[in-house]
Image (spheres, helix red, strand yellow):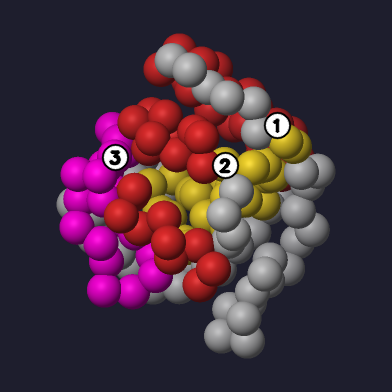
Amino acid sequence: MFNENQQSDSAPDLQEHPWISLETALDVEAWMDLQHRELQQALGDKPTTGQGICLTLVHGGELYLHTNSDGDVLLDLTEEAQWVAPVLTAVTRSTPPKGQVWGLPGHVLIQLILGLNTLIASSRLVLRHQYKGARVATA
């Protein structure tokens, strides 16, 4: 859920899917390819920004994931998901941001998904999400 300081996505989210454990880097790559194709199909020719994936976490909260045109990863944690910050630090070997949006180099995406694998309850595609502080430098 969003608090009053966050704006919900103005475009509707797509169907939520229960999480299926991804065991290998190949599993993650196949999942990412499927998500990319489904997102492109849903977007069509509509210009948009902030499209990506929302991961609902088993212990509460949501993590919005987006890759930019440079291949960098933006992660936006809801307030309820702040408990996962130490896991993000461990699996990406990065320093937590001062704000709520994490900027990470693209090469950590596979290890990020593998590291969060057992903590994800479900996923859904998001057609537009406003990332707070989207001008985040990657580590």
Q: Secondary structure at mark 2?
A: strand
Report the residue at 67% width, 42% height from top. 122
What is the span of residues highlighted in magenta in the rendered image?
89-109
The amino acid at mark 2 is Ile
Total labels drawn = 3
Say whether residue 95 is magenta: yes
Identify residue for label 1.
Answer: 38
Q: Which residue is more in the foreground, 101 or 88?
A: 88
Say whether residue 121 is magenta: no
**Residue 133, image x and y in percent?**
39, 73
**Residue 20, image x and y in percent?**
64, 26
Report the residue at 49% width, 49% height from top. 66
Q: Is residue 71 left or right of residue 29?
A: left
**Residue 107, image x and y in percent?**
28, 33
Report the residue at 25% width, 62% height from top. 96
Q: Is residue 54 visible?
A: no
Circle number at residue 22: none
Identify residue for label 2.
Answer: 120
Identify residue for label 3.
Answer: 91
Report the residue at 57% width, 24% height from top. 21
- Tag 3 or tag 2, which sits nearer the N-term? 3
Q: Quadrant of residue 130?
A: bottom right
The amino acid at mark 3 is Val
